Amino acid sequence: MDYMILIHRAEEGGFWSEVPSLPGCFSQGETVEEIIGNTKEAIELHIQALKEDNAEIPAEDDLIISHVRIESAAV
């Protein structure tokens, strides 16, 4: 099963991530490679906890990711 993750730069350095289809599933790391590995582990642990609670395991939502360009005069 694949899950989309969003990786953000942390203000204090490094990165943090979130998994939109798994609310409450977050991770952090110093490098992109580390954050991807840490997020994979966080997803696995999150799903394990859902199974232990007999909760439904969400499938990946149909997310649409896009960019919107704002002209410099508008900002």
Image: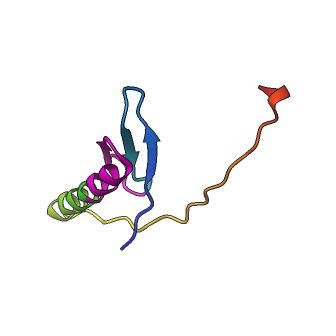
- Find the residue positioned furthest to the right: 73
Residue 23, magenta (yes or no): yes
Residue 28, magenta (yes or no): yes
- Tell me the residue at 23%/62% (across/down): 44
Which quadrant is home to the N terminus?
bottom left
- Tell me the residue at 37%/26% (across/down): 12
Magenta stretch: give its range.
21-40
Q: Is residue 19 left or right of residue 43?
A: right
Q: Is residue 38 left or right of residue 6?
A: left
The picture quadrant where one finds residue 27 is: top left
Which quadrant is home to the C terminus?
top right
Q: Position of residue 23 (x, y in %)?
A: 37, 49
The one nearer the camera, 48 or 7, is 7
The picture quadrant where one finds residue 22 is: bottom left
Q: Is residue 37 left or right of residue 72?
A: left
Q: Position of residue 5 (x, y in %)?
A: 43, 55
Above or below, 1 relative to 23: below
- Tell me the residue at 33%/49% (across/down): 35
